[in-house]
Image: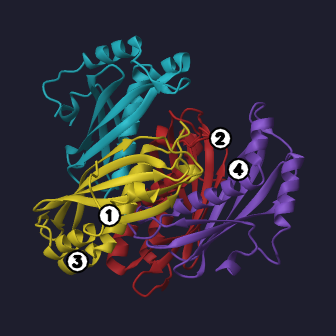
Chain colours: A purple, B cyan, C red, D yellow
Amino acid sequence: MEQLLEAYPVIVEIPIAWGDMDAFQHVNNTVYFKHFESARLAYFEKIGFMGVMADTGIGPILAATRCFFKIPLTYPDRVSVGASVDRIEADRFRMIYGVVSHAHGKLAATGEGTIVTFDYQAGRKMPIPERIENRIRALEATVARSDHG
Amino acid sequence: MEQLLEAYPVIVEIPIAWGDMDAFQHVNNTVYFKHFESARLAYFEKIGFMGVMADTGIGPILAATRCFFKIPLTYPDRVSVGASVDRIEADRFRMIYGVVSHAHGKLAATGEGTIVTFDYQAGRKMPIPERIENRIRALEATVARSDHG
Amino acid sequence: MEQLLEAYPVIVEIPIAWGDMDAFQHVNNTVYFKHFESARLAYFEKIGFMGVMADTGIGPILAATRCFFKIPLTYPDRVSVGASVDRIEADRFRMIYGVVSHAHGKLAATGEGTIVTFDYQAGRKMPIPERIENRIRALEATVARSDHG
Amino acid sequence: MEQLLEAYPVIVEIPIAWGDMDAFQHVNNTVYFKHFESARLAYFEKIGFMGVMADTGIGPILAATRCFFKIPLTYPDRVSVGASVDRIEADRFRMIYGVVSHAHGKLAATGEGTIVTFDYQAGRKMPIPERIENRIRALEATVARSDHG
């Protein structure tokens, strides 16, 4: 299981709740995005993005996100959700996600999100603060990566 | 249908979403509390509680809430959710709720909540601001009421 | 507002709930996917997909979905959510979504989903039932379309 | 922390998600009911209620539930949620819940639910199956209890 997420420097573990399932008796699609969010926030904590936001007013905004569903999840199960940044541009970066089902021992979903750095005071996009970019690069350097796809 | 909620001065109408149902193929119990919240917030808007909170720092905190489920709700349907304050004490008031299913033409659930007035700066309970109490009494006076039960 | 969604043959209208907002005080990203789902289910009802599923055991599975966030939504507001199928392949079709904020009079988000037709008994992908494909084509023919982008 | 929940024979541990918070930046009230549900389902599993439901068609229905909020929860935190049955009647039993915040080391909320045993085929309330009542009594006998209040 660890191998399935070895390319992700941040991993959170979350129990599947019975109430996550919908009338088709599978975990509802919106729940995957909540889990992506949990992994994203754990990543932001790790690079101190919330502290930088408090200091500078520049914080993250989710501009786009997507999910590819591979195996339906059901209760009971636990998932490990990995997050990694695999692309950095001037005013945005791309985060990719992997969701591993403990019951299946397999990748149940993958996803990605585009996060824009935004000056909440000025109301406009901003370059990624250098501190943040450096911490992302340092964090990503801790994981072996050949192919995130 | 209007008669079922005639004792409630504030009513909101909400479509039932397919995704509100859980694996038992009924609307999940947590959704009723979200609908109570929607009716509560509409009530707060109507009495200007959010404005008073911005001015004085004294706002509402939900201290307790309950729901009695009468008829299972299913998609597709719409609900009308009524809110009324039926008891005012020094530092709190009680709000009651009624949820009417349009598909059934019947009360599907009732509930109540205890709302405490709280000074968010000082971190302690406060007497209900007089303005708020007056507006609640004026609003409740607009509805005929014999028995809320 | 109608013009913004004129290319979508199915439109649902949904009130934004206070409880849809997260700690950043905007509507949380997962809520957009719930609204896509509501529009998707309304579309499925309109083409009788649920009836076909009951008859044949062949129903829809969401294989992938994405959202582009354009304007943050806040309470109070209402959204109209449009759904349209713009691509049909052998065993899948693509649905696109548009979310219009009534408060802004603008498109707040767009999205898309890949829906695979699946034999739930046999546990494998199936060609789209002809009845379903015909109804999709008939429904889509009712709307003027130049550019969905 | 264990002591706070020692009267509850079933305990589940759940991480608080950032997305559980609402615009007041506390965990939203509906989330507590989802956690009650998670503890309730773990309890049902432990007494084999789902198996009995599959065999006999008699299963649980939530007839009423309530929550008393004591300490606001915030992200990041973890909660342990205890469930115990403290009253059994002919066709229903009462479950009580305790939610302990790991960050505070204190009880953050308590609650209760009334669960009715229901024949889903016949569409009416039924006496609690003897097997179920026996297993509840056996499970509850495993915990020391003086006062659940």
Residue A63 disc label: 4
Say which chain tag 3 marks. D
Q: CA distance from mark 1 to mark 2?
A: 33 Å
Residue C144 left/right relative to B139: right
Q: Secondary structure at mark 4?
A: strand
Residue B4 left/right relative to D6: left
Q: Secondary structure at mark 3?
A: helix
Q: Residues within 10 Å of mark 4 (few under 14, many from 20)?
A: some
Query: Contact, CB < 8 Å: mark 1 with mark 4?
Result: no
User: Residue D89: x percent and y percent?
Assistant: 12, 59
Disc 2 designates what residue?
C71
Q: CA distance from mark 2 to mark 3?
A: 50 Å
Disc 1 designates what residue?
B25
Say which chain tag 4 marks. A
Q: Residues within 10 Å of mark 2 (few under 14, many from 20)?
A: some
Q: CA distance from mark 1 to mark 4?
A: 33 Å
User: Residue C88: x percent and y percent?
Assistant: 57, 71
Residue B60: in sight, yes or no? Answer: yes
Q: Nearer the viewer, residue D130 or B26?
A: D130
Q: CA distance from mark 3 to mark 4?
A: 48 Å
